[in-house]
Image (cartoon, rainbow, N blue to C red):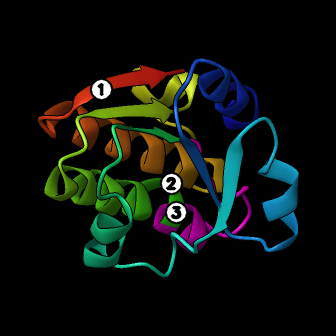
Amino acid sequence: VARIAGPLFAEGGYAVRAWVRNPAHVEEVSVASVKGELNSIEQMDQEKIAKELEGVDAILWSAGAGGGDPERTLGVDRDAAIRTMEAAKAAGVKRFVMVSYDGANAQGEPDKSTDFHYYWQAKKQADEHLRESGLDWTILA
Protein backbone atom coordinates (compact mmCIF):
# COMPACT_ATOMS: atom_id res chain seq x y z
CA VAL A 1 0.00 0.00 0.00
CA ALA A 2 2.69 2.50 0.99
CA ARG A 3 4.72 1.83 -2.16
CA ILE A 4 1.69 2.80 -4.23
CA ALA A 5 0.41 5.63 -2.02
CA GLY A 6 3.76 7.36 -1.43
CA PRO A 7 4.37 8.37 -5.05
CA LEU A 8 0.71 9.39 -5.44
CA PHE A 9 0.97 11.68 -2.41
CA ALA A 10 4.22 13.12 -3.76
CA GLU A 11 2.59 13.79 -7.14
CA GLY A 12 -0.19 15.58 -5.23
CA GLY A 13 2.34 18.02 -3.80
CA TYR A 14 3.00 16.44 -0.42
CA ALA A 15 6.50 15.93 0.98
CA VAL A 16 6.72 12.17 1.55
CA ARG A 17 9.19 10.35 3.78
CA ALA A 18 9.25 6.55 3.78
CA TRP A 19 10.81 4.90 6.82
CA VAL A 20 12.33 1.49 6.19
CA ARG A 21 14.17 -0.89 8.51
CA ASN A 22 16.26 -2.64 5.88
CA PRO A 23 19.08 -0.54 4.35
CA ALA A 24 18.57 -2.35 1.03
CA HIS A 25 15.07 -0.87 0.79
CA VAL A 26 16.07 2.81 1.09
CA GLU A 27 16.86 3.15 -2.61
CA GLU A 28 13.86 1.02 -3.55
CA VAL A 29 11.36 3.39 -1.87
CA SER A 30 13.17 6.57 -2.94
CA VAL A 31 11.18 7.16 -6.13
CA ALA A 32 8.84 9.86 -7.42
CA SER A 33 9.90 12.46 -4.83
CA VAL A 34 9.60 10.00 -1.96
CA LYS A 35 12.54 10.26 0.44
CA GLY A 36 13.56 6.87 1.82
CA GLU A 37 14.96 7.01 5.35
CA LEU A 38 16.49 4.26 7.46
CA ASN A 39 14.71 4.14 10.82
CA SER A 40 14.18 1.00 12.89
CA ILE A 41 10.73 1.58 14.28
CA GLU A 42 11.20 -1.54 16.42
CA GLN A 43 14.12 0.06 18.26
CA MET A 44 12.89 3.66 18.51
CA ASP A 45 11.26 4.86 21.71
CA GLN A 46 8.27 7.20 21.73
CA GLU A 47 10.39 10.31 22.35
CA LYS A 48 12.68 9.63 19.37
CA ILE A 49 9.71 8.89 17.13
CA ALA A 50 8.03 12.14 18.21
CA LYS A 51 11.18 14.11 17.40
CA GLU A 52 11.32 12.53 13.93
CA LEU A 53 7.64 13.37 13.39
CA GLU A 54 7.89 17.10 14.12
CA GLY A 55 6.35 19.01 11.22
CA VAL A 56 4.62 15.93 9.78
CA ASP A 57 0.96 16.32 8.79
CA ALA A 58 -0.04 12.67 8.45
CA ILE A 59 1.20 9.12 8.87
CA LEU A 60 0.43 6.13 6.68
CA TRP A 61 1.31 3.12 8.85
CA SER A 62 2.06 0.02 6.83
CA ALA A 63 4.92 -1.48 8.83
CA GLY A 64 4.60 -5.13 9.64
CA ALA A 65 6.68 -7.92 11.08
CA GLY A 66 6.10 -10.21 8.13
CA GLY A 67 4.79 -13.13 10.15
CA GLY A 68 6.55 -16.01 11.83
CA ASP A 69 7.84 -14.87 15.21
CA PRO A 70 4.95 -14.02 17.60
CA GLU A 71 7.14 -11.72 19.72
CA ARG A 72 8.21 -9.68 16.71
CA THR A 73 4.65 -9.63 15.35
CA LEU A 74 3.37 -8.12 18.59
CA GLY A 75 6.42 -5.84 18.78
CA VAL A 76 5.89 -4.29 15.34
CA ASP A 77 2.21 -4.69 14.48
CA ARG A 78 0.97 -3.65 17.92
CA ASP A 79 3.64 -2.08 20.15
CA ALA A 80 5.52 0.00 17.57
CA ALA A 81 2.23 1.09 16.00
CA ILE A 82 0.90 2.26 19.38
CA ARG A 83 4.18 4.03 20.25
CA THR A 84 3.97 5.82 16.91
CA MET A 85 0.36 6.87 17.55
CA GLU A 86 1.34 8.34 20.92
CA ALA A 87 4.42 9.99 19.42
CA ALA A 88 2.26 11.43 16.65
CA LYS A 89 0.00 13.09 19.21
CA ALA A 90 3.02 14.47 21.08
CA ALA A 91 4.48 15.86 17.83
CA GLY A 92 1.21 17.47 16.77
CA VAL A 93 0.50 15.09 13.88
CA LYS A 94 -3.23 15.16 13.23
CA ARG A 95 -3.89 12.32 10.77
CA PHE A 96 -3.07 8.62 11.09
CA VAL A 97 -3.94 6.08 8.39
CA MET A 98 -3.53 2.46 9.49
CA VAL A 99 -3.09 -0.37 7.01
CA SER A 100 -4.71 -3.17 8.96
CA TYR A 101 -6.14 -6.63 8.44
CA ASP A 102 -9.72 -7.21 7.33
CA GLY A 103 -10.37 -9.80 10.02
CA ALA A 104 -8.99 -7.75 12.91
CA ASN A 105 -12.46 -6.69 13.97
CA ALA A 106 -14.30 -9.90 13.18
CA GLN A 107 -16.17 -11.77 15.87
CA GLY A 108 -14.22 -14.63 17.37
CA GLU A 109 -10.51 -15.16 17.07
CA PRO A 110 -8.15 -17.49 15.23
CA ASP A 111 -6.87 -20.65 16.85
CA LYS A 112 -4.41 -19.63 19.58
CA SER A 113 -2.02 -22.39 18.58
CA THR A 114 -1.27 -20.69 15.25
CA ASP A 115 1.12 -17.81 14.58
CA PHE A 116 -1.74 -16.05 12.81
CA HIS A 117 -3.45 -15.57 16.16
CA TYR A 118 -0.70 -13.14 17.20
CA TYR A 119 -1.07 -11.11 14.00
CA TRP A 120 -4.83 -10.90 14.53
CA GLN A 121 -4.32 -9.90 18.18
CA ALA A 122 -1.72 -7.26 17.31
CA LYS A 123 -3.84 -5.67 14.57
CA LYS A 124 -7.01 -5.77 16.68
CA GLN A 125 -5.32 -4.07 19.64
CA ALA A 126 -3.56 -1.47 17.47
CA ASP A 127 -6.82 -0.62 15.68
CA GLU A 128 -8.65 -0.30 19.02
CA HIS A 129 -5.93 2.01 20.33
CA LEU A 130 -6.11 4.16 17.21
CA ARG A 131 -9.89 4.53 17.50
CA GLU A 132 -9.47 5.83 21.06
CA SER A 133 -6.34 7.92 20.37
CA GLY A 134 -7.94 11.25 19.61
CA LEU A 135 -6.15 11.36 16.24
CA ASP A 136 -8.07 11.88 13.01
CA TRP A 137 -7.83 8.29 11.78
CA THR A 138 -8.66 5.93 8.95
CA ILE A 139 -8.24 2.17 9.07
CA LEU A 140 -7.76 0.43 5.73
CA ALA A 141 -8.66 -3.24 5.82
> Reading the chain from its start, which is encountered first: label 1 or label 3?
3
- The picture places residue 58, in percent across and down from the top left corner, at 37, 36
For badge 1, the amino acid type reads Trp
In the picture shown, does residue 34 fall above or below 23? above
How far apart marks 1 and 2 lie (CA) works out to 17 Å
Q: Which residue is denoted by mark 3 in the rendering?
A: 76
Residue at disc 1, secondary structure: strand
In the picture shown, does residue 25 fall above or below 31? below
Between 36 and 87, the residue placed more toward the observer is 36
- The picture places residue 82, in percent across and down from the top left corner, at 31, 55
> Reading the chain from its start, which is encountered first: label 1 or label 2?
2
Instruction: Report the span colored magenta.
Output: 62-75
Q: Residues within 10 Å of mark 3 (few under 14, many from 20)?
A: many
What residue is at 54 percent from the left and 73 percent from the top? 71
Q: Which residue is denoted by mark 1 in the rendering?
A: 137
Q: Are marks 2 and 3 in contact (CB under 8 Å)?
A: yes
Q: How crowded is mark 1: few (under 14 residues within 10 Å), some or many (20 or more)?
A: some
